[in-house]
Amino acid sequence: MSSDTRLAFEHPIARAEAAGQPSRPPDRISLRDHVLEVDIGAFQSERGKRQRLNFNIVVEVTPPSGPVEDDVDKILSYDTITEAIAHELAEERLNLLETLAERVADRVLHAARALRVFVRIEKLDRGPGALGVEIVRTRGQLPTAADDAGDVPHPRVVHLANAAIAAPGLGAFLDALAADGLPVILCVGPGDGPAPQTGHAMTQRRIDLLAIEQNAWVLASRDNRCVVVATRTELDWAMKHGQISAWAPSKIVLDAVDGPSASPRDALALTAWFAELMQATELLVLGDDAPEAEVPSRSLALGEMP
């Protein structure tokens, strides 16, 4: 067995120690066998069930230029690692360990003295052994999550009643929104037709979310500018590039760590939750009464459409 193959299955500390040694090797701090229960996984059987993840992380750091003098401000704290894990787990529910490892690595590398990070994450309850991923990332290799945080725009969220979707003046209304220059995300409720009823809470929630998504596609058919979007990444891209998005809620709602308390059947309350999540500048409701929300909200009658 080659050295590289052997090291691939060694602990991250062994991997770090086997790396080439410069004239002044970096210092290392590590977190070993940090076990947390997390809702994660791409399979339906993993949703809603917490499973144990084991984190092992080694961070190579710039050696201090002078005496540490027992001053915590002169070192990279262990809290940097544990807080990076906690932050990414709280941000949203993830499907892949690879995504979680990448985000934790990016956040750790935002620390001033961090040079390189080794991240191993293992699922302890998924199979007969520990199933996991291991990555190595170096400062400057990728933009860090914290670097990108300030670039996310704050949109105007607009909820359209079904009568507004069908209104002849929809195109002129979208023209007026586009002319304001603010990023726009459109939200809708379910269509007017009845949705299937299952009598089962989890499956009914999925059906009700899909009913909203079907209506978003109806909106998209009314105007080509209304692009149906499901992920936060796509929404952020669309806002930065002047694209009007019609929100398909299933992924963001189901992946949210602290999801909405409102049922998808209460479409206005769901839109209010989404507006707060997106830190919207305004929630505008066309053709219905504006709900209570943490962001400024107002309603517009159909007769007030341009």
Image: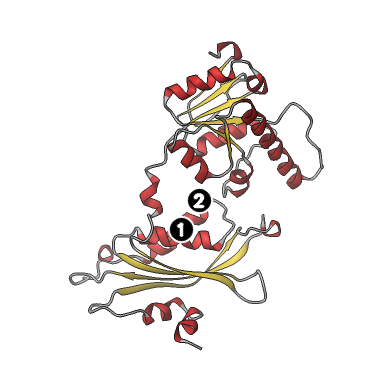
Q: Position of residue 163 (x, y in %)?
A: 67, 19
- In the picture, measured across the screen, residue 287 lies left or right of residue 33, that is right
Outermost residue on the front side: it is 224
| Residue 237 in view of the camera | yes
Write the residue at 38% across / 55% down.
144
Q: Is residue 258 above or below residue 245?
A: below
Amino acid residing under circle 2 = Glu
Numbered disc in front, either 2 or 1: 1
- In the picture, measured across the screen, residue 59 lies left or right of residue 295, that is left
Write the residue at 44% across / 76% down.
12
Q: Is residue 137 above or below residue 272?
A: below
Q: What whole-number distance in Å separates the C-alpha atoms at marks 2 and 1?
A: 10 Å
Task: Tell me if label 2 and label 1 are in contact, CB under 8 Å.
Answer: yes
* Residue marked by disc 1: 103
Look at the numbered disc 2 and give the secondary structure of its residue: helix
| Residue 120 in view of the camera | no
* Viewer-proximal residue among 86 and 95: 95
- In the picture, measured across the screen, residue 61 lies left or right of residue 304, that is left
- In the picture, measured across the screen, residue 99 lies left or right of residue 151, that is right
Q: Work out whether mark 2 precedes mark 1 in sequence or the reverse, and give the earlier one.
A: 2
Outermost residue on the top side: it is 303
* Viewer-proximal residue among 260 and 274: 274
Name the colouring of the figure: secondary structure
* Viewer-proximal residue among 232 and 271: 232
Numbered mark located on residue 91 in the image: 2
Write the residue at 52% across / 31% down.
244
Q: Tag 2: Cα neighbours inside 10 Å, few (<14), some, or many (≥20)?
A: few
